[in-house]
Amino acid sequence: MSLLPTPFEAEVARQLQICNACRYCEGYCAVFPAMTRRLSFERADVHYLAHLCHNCGACYHACQYAPPHEFAVNVPRAMAQMRRESYAAYAWPAALGQLYRRNGPTLALALTLSLGLFLLLILRSRGTAASSPLGGNFYTVFSHEFLVALFGSVLGIALLALTLGVRRFWRDSAAGPAPAPAVREAAYDTLALTYLGGGQEQGCNEADDRFTLARRRFHHLTFYGFLLCLAATLVATVDHYVLGERAPYPLLSAPVLLGTLGGLGLLFGPAGLLWLNLRRDANVGDPAQRPMDRGFILLLLLTSVSGLSLLAWRDSAAMALLLALHLGAVLALFMTLPYGKFAHGAYRSAALLKWTIEKRQKETLS
């Protein structure tokens, strides 16, 4: 990264200096008590505090210096802009950091290529797959070995890229060793989405200054829906390799039940988040980041809708085409994990861990 502060870094530092003098919002979330531990705001500080911000919007509506005041303090927007720049700055490989700034076209290209791949493979390898029932057996369309090799390699590379990016962020933050109590507290705050409760556990501000817990609830549906889908895959892996049970699995089997519940979570959660995103006050957040936000939400919706449709019609003649649609959506999701909205979960978790470590330190930082 450049040694000179970028305009976004300078703007975050300017606004935080004003906030540090005022301190009206000190009890609102983790950002403000973390801010008060600093006398100045270096590059690593603004990146860390930006990821610690959950964009609940409470401080914007409470701030006496918000626009049209000449100080023009809008912490949610400044932090959102800083996060987008931070993702690009810490991305690995560095050249791919530009994908964050052009995330809409990136998602569209990844999805197009993924869908094209599976549809082409269907047409080349099984001319009857698009018109003949196949007994719900996905492996008559694509072999188990092929799917494991393709998705395993793409996911492995994506997780490696995301891990190396977060590792660079962690090193810059100089958080130090993480004691077990700090890890437990950070894990709780991450899993419970503590700071989407706003300043007084009333929730976030969305369309106006009224509080609502809707975003926290929709985030929970999305997050735990994703985890249930992951659990379904892991259980199916054990069934396949350890117990010798092959797909297709019965409707009341553990993989199908877990996958169905996860798919429903990934249906209602992202649908709610998209509804909130479309209604949200334009003054809160970064307008330039909305294509990335909405593109990711729509990709999650496509993944869930195609997966649930595939389960419902797996014994029909449409199974192969539905399978291609679902696998294309999942592959596009995997390909873009390190360079899209999914990354915010990893960076925010790291920032929360740094905060729980920092709270246990008595000395003033910076």
Image (cartoon, rainbow, N blue to C red):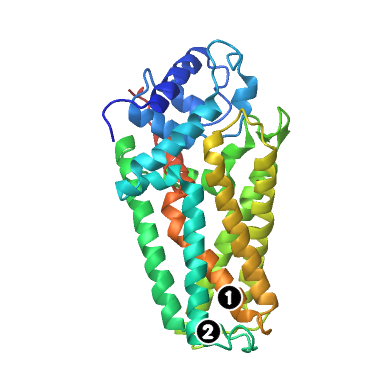
Q: Alpha-carbon distance for marks 1 and 2?
A: 9 Å
Q: Hey, which residue is sitting farthest left in the picture?
A: 3
State which quadrant residue 43 falls in.
Answer: top left
Q: Kindly identify the residue that appears in the image at 44 percent across and 22 percent down.
A: 11
* Secondary structure found at label 1: helix
Q: Kindly identify the residue that appears in the image at 52 percent across and 39 percent down.
A: 289
Residue situated in front as seen by the camera: 190 or 304:
304
Residue 17, given in percent of the width and then of the height, sits at 44, 16
Residue 327, given in percent of the width and then of the height, sits at 53, 70
Residue 328, given in percent of the width and then of the height, sits at 52, 68
User: Which label number is shown at residue 90?
Assistant: none
Q: Is residue 158 above or below residue 74?
A: below
Q: Kindly identify the residue that appears in the image at 38 percent across and 52 percent down.
A: 162
Q: Which residue is mark 1?
A: 323
Amino acid type indicated by mark 1: Leu
Circle 1 residues within 10 Å: few <14, some 14–19, many ≥20: many
Q: Is residue 33 above or below residue 191?
A: above
Amino acid type indicated by mark 2: Val
- Asked if one can make out residue 142 in the rendered structure from this viewpoint, the answer is no
Residue situated in front as seen by the camera: 302 or 349:
302
Residue 331, given in percent of the width and then of the height, sits at 48, 65
Q: Which residue is mark 2?
A: 141
The answer to whether mark 1 and mark 2 are in CB contact below 8 A is yes
